[in-house]
Amino acid sequence: MSSASDPLRIEYADGPHGLRIARQSPPPGAASFSATYIGPGGWAYDRPGAEGTARMTAHLLPSGAGSRDRIELARYLDRAGGTLNAQCDPESAEVTVWGPVDSTDVLMGVLADAVLRPRFDATDLERVRRQLIERQLRELSQPGARADRELHRAIFPSGHPYRSTGAGDRKTVSRVRPSDLTKFHRQHFTGEGGILVVTTPRNLSSVVRLVGRRFSDLPARAPPPLSVPKPRHGSPRDVSIDLPGRSQVEVRLGGSSIARDDPSYAAAYLADEVLGGATLLSRLFTRVRSKGGLAYHASSHLEAMKFGGYWVAQAGTGGDRWRKVVPMLRQEVARITRETIPSAELDLIRESRIGEVALALESTSDAHELALEVAYYGLPGDYWVTWPSVLRGLSPAEVRQAAEVALDGRRAASVVVGPLGGLP
């Protein structure tokens, strides 16, 4: 397989008005393509008192664009065999189109319409407004969503991009108007700071020409600057919220962590996989779920992003068992940072994670996710080619040292939400 047709290699080029283009080959034999625009339109950019604007903007992009309203667009996509969706996170917003290779030109036009010419029709706005208010209710009333919400509030100070879920509250969401969405869209869906990732059998020069035609109207302005306060580093915070009548208690233990460009990321990633990321093989699953029988789920996750990151160890358990689960999570987090991982255990997790990359090449959409990660974080084009050797080159001592910083349990916040007095 030549380097130009290897889906693990990403090629870069400059597009119109500061847009960065990343091109990836699809897996061998794949008959579909995928393209994603990533722009600086995450909820970190919501104005105070206008929280929810970023999420509403992103959710409305596939609901009518250019000359087509929501129904016309859905039928047009159906005839082309394509899908269009959008999502939002703290740092960015993404719009993705997927479909047959033969429909590439047509579907790239749909993506350009969604990115450049969204309609923000009033009826669609009301539908998304209701959905966001429903999300707010779930975040307050469901143990899992409430535990996640409270953990972020315990770790990060007001104004930090990772503190909130971007859903706002009923008051902020209720006063968003189409003009607010238009203004936010104009400021944040730009060429400068934007990335377009395309997974296609076409070569890079062909992709550049296609993008140049479809995205020639992309605004050249840079996104507004963003101020990011430092995470809290005081005494650990413990939060307990009783929700009588619920079926289980959700437990979270976590703290701030490293950014994606930190040199120790690969080692920290392996440490987290041993702790709870590699679910069935991990220590948390084995001790709390498999051997202990104390939880419905037990895992961990390291989220390393551009502005920093966070880690979380979590479990869902019964109202009569959560008091046993919390110290177990603390003990396992402490052990991963203080004790060197046995070589056999580390090798098992290491090879399992390396194998996950190969599995991602079974479909265009999964391979596309690999390209998105590389392009968004500005990683080298051969990042996934060298990833196995990077992981295999890490010693148990290096992994422990990275865990000591990235998974620091000494200042971790704990959150327990659910029927704390026991099941009904």
Image: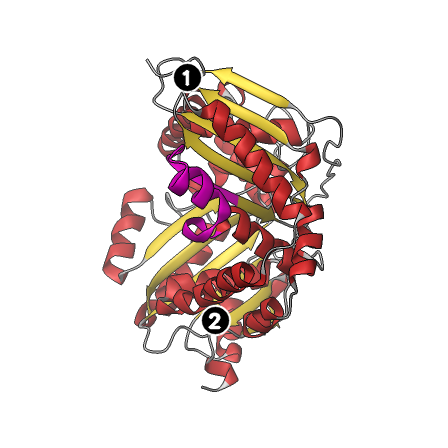
Range shown magenta: 278-300
Q: Earlier in the sequence, mark 2 or mark 1?
A: 2
Q: Given this view, does label 2 or label 1 mark the residue nearer the observer?
A: 1
For the residue labelled by badge 2, is the local secondary structure a helix, a strand or a loop? helix
Where does the C terminus fall, quadrant-wise?
top left
Residue drawn at point x = 42 percent, y = 40 percent: 60
Against 278, residue 5 (above or below) is below
Residue drawn at point x = 48 percent, y = 71 percent: 210
Look at the numbered discs 2 and 1 and tell me whether their residues touch, using CB distance below 8 Å.
no
Against 134, residue 282 (above or below) is below
Residue 380: horizontal and vertical position, in percent?
63, 70
Q: Is residue 89 magenta?
A: no
Residue beneath disc 1: 419
- Between 268 and 225, which is closer to the camera in this rendering? 268
Residue 33: horizontal and vertical position, in percent?
38, 68
Residue 349: horizontal and vertical position, in percent?
50, 60
Quarter of the figure with residue 240: top right
Against 13, residue 314 (above or below) is above
Q: Is residue 297 magenta?
A: yes
Q: Amino acid at mark 2?
A: Leu
- Between 301 and 174, which is closer to the camera in this rendering? 301
Instruction: Please say whether residue 174 is visible from this viewpoint.
Output: no
- Between 395 and 26, which is closer to the camera in this rendering? 395
Residue beneath disc 2: 210
- Between 33 and 103, which is closer to the camera in this rendering? 33
Q: Amino acid at mark 1?
A: Pro
Label number found at residue 189:
none
Instruction: Please say whether residue 319 is visible from this viewpoint.
Output: yes
